[in-house]
Image: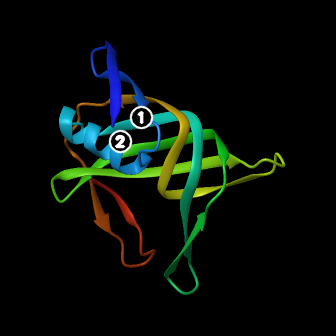
Amino acid sequence: MYKYKEYAPGRYVLSLDNHVEIFSSIEAFCKEKNILSGRVDGLGAVSEATFRYLNPSTMQYVDKTFCEQMEITNLTGNISRKDGKPYLHVHITASRSDYSCIGGHMLSGVVNGACELFVEDFACPSIGRYKDTETGLNLYKFD
């Protein structure tokens, strides 16, 4: 699923295997290392990606999957905890073959080529999440 190297205490370089799902791979790594707060960023390529958009007027999520080869020009996110498990909030920008970009909240992405990430563990278990009724979002909760 991935290979990694810890280059400083709590700081990792991850290389995801080809054809794996990005979101679940990061989640598995966080569980393996017991990372409950931190950040992730990276780049790579995908053959498929699903984005999510929250329509604030309807409070409904709209998901859209793109099935095409794209370069990940930026992947950035944060790691917190929800229900005692790692919770990822990840955004992605991807470049299409015509050099236009699409992006947004990432639900999933399938590596096609490479995906190289940096993960930093903040070692702070007190950053959690709660469901905010006004926005419909899972917002930070500081214990």
Residue 22 location in percent, x, y?
Answer: 43, 46
Q: Residues within 10 Å of mark 1 (few under 14, many from 20)?
A: some
> Up-down: is 14 above or below 64?
above
Q: Circle 1 sits in a helix, a strand or a loop, which is it?
A: loop
> Up-down: is 143 above or below 52?
above
Residue 16 location in percent, x, y?
Answer: 42, 34
> Up-down: is 72 above or below 141?
above
Residue toward you, 111 or 5: 111
Q: Residue furthest top?
A: 7
> Residue at position x 35%, y 22% from top?
12
> Up-down: is 13 above or below 62?
above
Residue toward you, 13 or 11: 13
Q: Circle 2 sits in a helix, a strand or a loop, which is it?
A: helix
- 31 relative to 38 in the view: left or right: left
Q: Which residue is mark 2?
A: 26
Q: Which residue is mark 1?
A: 17
Residue toward you, 5 or 140: 5
Report if residue 5 is visible in the image: yes
> Residue at position x 58%, y 35% from top?
44
Residue toward you, 71 or 101: 71
> Residue at position x 40%, y 49% from top?
23
- 7 relative to 55 in the view: left or right: left
